[in-house]
Image (cartoon, helix red, strand yellow):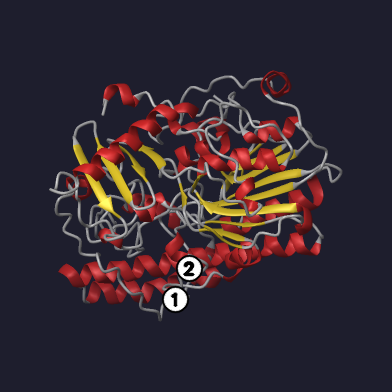
């Protein structure tokens, strides 16, 4: 097997790639207008709205990300269809829910790269298309004029890249900077400048284990972050939440060495070996910078280790500091892209999108990670800087989902939206319209269990006030929340007297969504 495919799949069998030219002719509609519009789509991994100051100013400032929101639009009700990296990316690129695009989870799914995707439609319409950075869909990219991707999750230091030509190479430096370097080089030197382009810049940041660039090793070390009110949640009435292995306080869930960098050669932890491999990817200069900051913290921690609640609070502060450092590098690099587009006179005819593959827990419910349909991971930041001709600025409050991105890009490019795409084009919202028939509720489905973090399989529906979730498979538990009265989702109302009418109404919405999106699970668990 080709070595780059082994890196990508761990040795799994690879389906043959379909010939793109033939596939494009067979599956892709013709462009309906000659107006060229460029698209720059920047997506990070696990970047949550709480850590982006356009949404939340409690923790840190993100001035470059905020430039996009301030000069364009901010979606205040932006959600994902499946809060997990690979499945979220598959939803985004196909415009379809997980059960339709076939990539339901990171453990057992394989993305059929012969299926239609928005880059293929754009390429067929004359676009230069490129994806650089994290791919995480097991199969290799198709529908791109150019691609260079990291294997699996990627490496923060001295990262490996799989190239279109078939080579796997190592590039020296810090991954967030390198992905931006490669993206700007493609824009400046490699694309056909007579054609419109769609560039997907996909970062590993801010993925676990939150390793910072050398220039920001000591950033935020003097800051104390406020803890969420429900950090010490006892999960009463929510057995699926209680079973999840995402607790910052747990030595199994948040590893003191892997996650928090508290190296100890005499201490064995579950992920110690993985951390050692990451640390050893640093060159001597990176190690020197890292050791200068972290060694004194390590010495102090083991000299007088906190216990109980004090240990949990200490772990939370370390987690927040490291996460924020990685965000800072990301924000810098988004600024580099914006500056380049501005200097080259491209902003007037370029849609710039920034989002994440899902949200993340920053101590809410005592957690890190994602997966649940609860708000912190169900939501995702979404801001757009609009091209000339779109006067809309400010907040867009309608409910949107990551299945909407693909049809939006196609309509803006003048390409007919295929009937089998399940998302809705956001173009009317970008024009300042408020369609009467816009969706008033959202469907969600998470599949990856049993797996890391032990989050039960579940599906659910959310409207502007209520959320109904059904946990299934090895559990049969319903949860109902009044998000107006209980925004932190601490009080499960399901089955309580007085909620019968609300429950019936939400179950009707859930059934309608399952039928609308043709989720076959509706036959296994009829309502």
Between 425 and 297, the residue placed more toward the observer is 425
**Residue 150 in view, yes or no:** no
Measuring from the top left, give residue 325's x and y in whole percent: 48, 68
Decide if residue 268 is on the left or right side of residue 331: left
At 54% across and 37% down in the image, what residue appears?
A: 423
Query: Above or below — where is 270 with respect to 125?
Result: below
Q: Which residue is mark 1?
A: 220
Q: In this view of the protein, can residue 12 be seen by the observer?
A: yes
Q: How many marks?
A: 2
Viewer-proximal residue, 214 or 19? 19
Q: Residue at x 29, y 63 (%)?
A: 264
Disc 1 + disc 2, Cβ < 8 Å: yes
Where residue 208 sits, quadrant-wise, is bottom left
The reply, left or right, for residue 405 in relation to residue 506 is: right
Label 1 element class: loop
Q: Which residue is mark 2?
A: 325
Task: Look at the picture and state if 322 lies above or below 428.
Answer: below
Outermost residue, right side = 194
Task: Where is residue 415? Give x, y as percent.
Answer: 72, 34
* Relative vertical location of residue 120 with respect to residue 224 in this rendering, above or below: above
Return the mark for residue 197: none
Left or right: 474, with 423 as reference point: left
């Amino acid at each position: 097997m080709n070595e780059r495919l082994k890196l990508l799949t761990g040795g799994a069998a690879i389906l043959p790639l379909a010939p793109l030219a033939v596939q494009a002719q067979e599956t892709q509609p013709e462009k309906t207008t000659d107006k060229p519009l460029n698209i720059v789509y920047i997506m990070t991994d696990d970047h949550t709205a709480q850590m982006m100051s356009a949404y939340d100013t409690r923790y840190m400032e993100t001035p470059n990300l905020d430039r996009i929101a301030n000069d364009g639009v901010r979606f205040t009700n932006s959600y994902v269809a499946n809060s997990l990296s690979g499945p979220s990316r598959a939803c985004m690129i196909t415009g379809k829910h997980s059960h339709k695009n076939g990539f339901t989870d990171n453990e057992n799914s394989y993305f059929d790269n012969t299926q239609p995707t928005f880059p293929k439609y754009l390429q067929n319409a004359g676009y230069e298309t490129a994806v650089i950075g994290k791919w995480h869909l097991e199969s290799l990219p198709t529908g791109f004029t150019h691609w260079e991707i990291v294997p699996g999750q990627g490496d923060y230091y001295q990262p490996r890249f799989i190239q279109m030509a078939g080579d796997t190479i190592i590039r020296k430096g810090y991954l967030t900077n390198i992905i931006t370097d490669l993206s700007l080089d493609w824009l400046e030197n490699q694309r056909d400048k007579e054609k419109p382009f769609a560039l997907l810049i996909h970062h590993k940041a801010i993925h676990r284990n939150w390793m910072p660039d050398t220039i920001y090793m000591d950033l935020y070390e003097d800051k104390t972050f406020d803890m969420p009110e429900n950090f010490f949640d006892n999960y009463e009435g929510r057995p699926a939440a209680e079973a999840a292995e995402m607790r910052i306080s747990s030595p199994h869930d948040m590893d003191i060495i892997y996650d928090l960098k508290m190296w100890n050669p005499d201490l064995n932890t579950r992920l110690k070996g993985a951390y050692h491999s990451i640390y050893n990817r640093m060159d001597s200069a990176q190690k020197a910078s890292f050791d200068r900051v972290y060694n004194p913290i390590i010495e102090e921690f083991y000299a007088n280790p906190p216990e109980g609640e004090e240990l949990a609070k200490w772990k939370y502060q370390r987690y927040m500091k490291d996460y924020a450092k990685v965000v800072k590098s990301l924000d810098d690099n988004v600024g580099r892209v914006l500056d380049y587009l501005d200097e080259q006179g491209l902003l007037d005819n370029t849609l710039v999108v920034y989002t994440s593959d899902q949200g993340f827990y920053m101590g809410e419910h005592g957690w890190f990670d994602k997966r649940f349909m609860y708000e912190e991971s169900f939501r995702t930041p979404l801001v757009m800087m609009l091209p000339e001709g779109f006067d809309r600025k400010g907040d867009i409050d309608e409910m949107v989902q990551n299945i909407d991105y693909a049809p939006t890009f196609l309509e803006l490019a003048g390409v007919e939206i295929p009937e089998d795409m399940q998302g809705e084009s956001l173009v009317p919202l970008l024009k300042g319209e408020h369609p009467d028939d816009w969706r008033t509720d959202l469907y969600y489905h998470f599949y990856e269990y049993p797996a890391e973090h032990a989050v039960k399989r579940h599906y659910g529906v959310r409207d502007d006030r209520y959320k109904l979730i059904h946990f299934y498979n090895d559990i049969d538990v319903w949860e109902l929340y009044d998000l107006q009265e209980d925004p932190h989702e601490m009080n499960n109302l399901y089955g309580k007297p007085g909620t019968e009418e609300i429950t019936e109404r939400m179950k009707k919405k859930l059934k309608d969504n399952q039928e609308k999106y043709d989720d076959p699970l509706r036959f296994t668990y009829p309502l």
